[in-house]
Amino acid sequence: MTGIVVVSHSRRLAEGVAELATQMTQGKANIAIAAGIDDPENPIGTDAIAVMGAIEEVCDDDGVVVLMDLGSALLSTEMAIELIDPEVAEKVKLVSAPVVEGTLAASVAAAAGLDIDTVISEAKAALGVKQEHLGETDDSVAPEVAVQSASDALSFEWQVENPHGIHARPAASIVGAVAAFNCDMWLIKGDKEVSAKSLNSIAKLAVSKGESICFKASGDNAQGAIDAFKQLAHTHFGEADLVNNPQPEPETEQVASAPSHQAIKGAITGLSVNGGIVTGPAVLFSASMPDVPNRSCASIADEQSHFTQSIETVSASLKQQASEPHGEIFQAHLLMLNDPELLASVQTRIAQNVIAEQAWVEVTQQLALEYSQAESAYMQEREADVHDIACQVMRVMTGDTDAGITLSEPSILLARDLMPSDVAGLDKSLVLAICLSEGGKTSHSAILARAMGIPAIVQAKGCLEEIQAGQHISVDGFSGLLWHSPDSDTSAELEQKRQQWLAECEAAKANAQSQAATLDGLEIQSLANIGGPEDVQAALDNGAEGVGLFRTEFLFQSRDTLPSEDEQTEVYLGIAKAFGDKPITIRSLDVGGDKPLKAYPMPVEENPFLGLRGVRLCLAHKDLFVDQIRAVLRAHAQQPNIQLMIPMIATVDEIHQVKALVEEQKQALGLQESNLPVGIMIEVPAAVLNADALAKEVDFFSIGTNDLTQYVMAADRGNTDVATLVNYFEPAVLSAIEITCKAAKNAGIAVSMCGEMAGDTKATETLLKLGLTKFSASSTLLPALKQTVRGISLATTETV
Ligand code: PEP
Ligand code: MG
């Protein structure tokens, strides 16, 4: 049945609407609400994460219709759609229908089992009766005029119908569609003219619904660019869906309403971002931009190359982060960083004999200022993103690598605002809570804090001034309160609330410690993906029954020197000991063109994902590989729960070469008797097609669906333009998994999965049916994975 989601600023309003619809359909409609925010002082507002939750709650194969009240309800919903699993996002339709009438009509149609298109048209027609009654009519306009300008530039005019105008996403579509053309291009609104290749500039034009824009192109294949733009315009810059369901004119968006700051004795009030109650010492962090060095411009060419190299370094790291969970934020930063207009402005300043750092700071400060003055709150919050990329580039340019947050004990982190890169790089085990004096509920750092499960509040005005470093404070993430001097009654109340919260967390985790089995008794092994020793405790706490993937590249990346054989041995041993006799799968170094090693520079490749990565690089640079093999062999001699896994294997010859190296090092170390299991990742289509032959050579397979999906679908896993293709539910990917499982079964070797799909509970039943019984995922996903397994029955399914 089509699900219905009501997004409103007011929880009471949404509950009332849902109640009406439920009554009208005798409880048959599948309705969820996402309304209000978790702040008792100031409950009016909308929250993208809540919208995601509501969509997931009611989504099934028939799709979901979302009705929103106004303003930021639309933006929160759009953000939720951007963040949600693309497979779910595809099934979600946003409709412009009025919330009350539309929800009622949609619910009735959905409850009657009508298809989603009918549900939508019912919702949209819902106002008709009232309009007719009041004698109102609806006029719509369809504007488009193609003109040729007086100069040699070709031009095309368009009246924008997108409900939110040309905001960041349509702007990105424009850049994506035309940037490849070699000619000069401009986008013009009134007397403002900007480069059509610049995301920032287009967004700053602030084109609203109903306004006319003119796209001009001049030079080589200008006609091609015009055609491309025209085609895109006809799809409403990728928002045809929203436009074809025209929405009421949104009210000017309100800046995320500030908390009332009603004085609460002993506390600072903020907005709740993530629940939880903690007490601990305060650490005050100020994300300072490294100073511009005091030097003069030696040579313009040197300054330009210094700048370009720094941009490349930051781009490579953003690209890496973009391919990880919650990577969309970093993908947006990548786009912003490589904005041609931004880069050109810096190069222009450098050409005027300004040193690269100074030029970069000047240009990005101006850009941040422009964002901060934007009309929409969403665009204003992008100021923090500009600041983030600006700092990252400055850190690289100045070599100031100590600017990040380092915590030595569990602490409550106080800052004005945090950059996504700061939050992503936090040692989660030491962050008790995050408390920001600025920030918004939709800021990227808030989203990341929530995703990482850290109690957090924002807009706690004055916290940096009133709190001293080291002072013991309490944060109530549920109420958005920071307590610096609670009276004894409040302390007791807080403690009681905290104990209750801890008990609930404990209960959830307690269940996570027992092994999961399906209803018909098939036992499943739930393993953790880790990046280093810092992840071990969380893995154990979340009930990991071993490590299915230890991404050792985290030991190597962002270091100035390579970790020695001894150092690696210590790390591997430490982790293996922590897990007792549970299996530890150490993946050999998986770096390459897209994941550069600072301590081992390699040439930039044209097609890094098809280049010297994973085992290919290790076999080409045996010095790197041999140290690691020796470290694994030595650790295994003491901890037999260790096994070695090789990434990116495509051919039998590659595994022969690896095995020969392992044998050679066994001899060299006097460990001839070692029975170190050696397995491979199945993540390259050739490995799937060679699976029978490979299975005869190795001790186990582990399916890496992240890469397998990108290679099977020929769709870059970090490129949002092809994100819908990077879908592990595609039949071709499922077939590849099935072939792999069968080959493993025939050869009698174990097969597991360690790509993101393994932790996706929507895939669990399918994977069990394909014969998988070993899953390796981020440890925070394991409790839910186990719960899902416990609800599945496979009575008639044959398994490996
Ligand atoms: C994979 O490709 O699925 C995988 C687990 O490896 P990574 O994400 O590290 O490439
Ligand atoms: Mg991989």
Image (cartoon, grey):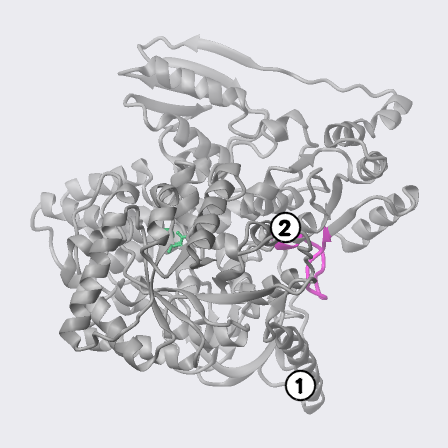
Is the residue at mark 2 in contact range of ligand 1, meaning its CB lies under 8 Å from it?
Answer: no
Residue in view at x 13 percent, y 45 percent: 353
Q: Quadrant of residue 571?
A: bottom left
Asked whether the beta carbons under mark 2 and mark 1 sit within 8 Å of each other, the answer is no
- Give how far across and how far down residue 12 sits, in percent: 81, 54
The residue stretch that appears in magenta:
34-52
Residue in view at x 64 percent, y 42 percent: 74
* Residue beneath disc 1: 495
Whole-angstrom CA distance, mark 2 to mark 1, is 31 Å
Category of crowding for the residue at label 2, using alpha-carbon neighbours closer than 10 angstroms: few (below 14), some (14–19), many (at least 20): many
**Quadrant housing the N terminus:** top right
User: Would residue 716 be seen by someone viewing this image from the given angle?
Assistant: no
Q: Amino acid at mark 1?
A: Glu
* Residue beneath disc 2: 52
* Along the line of sight, the residue nearer the viewer: 113 or 704: 704
Position of residue 780 in the picture relative to residue 1 (left or right): left
Q: Residue furthest left?
A: 298
Q: Predominant secondary structure in magenta?
A: loop
Disc 1, SS: helix
Position of residue 88 in the picture relative to residue 3 (left or right): left
Position of residue 483 in the picture relative to residue 391 (left or right): right
Residue 247 in magenta? no
Q: Residue furthest bottom?
A: 488
- Give how far across and how far down residue 129 sits, in percent: 88, 26
* Along the line of sight, the residue nearer the viewer: 232 or 653: 653
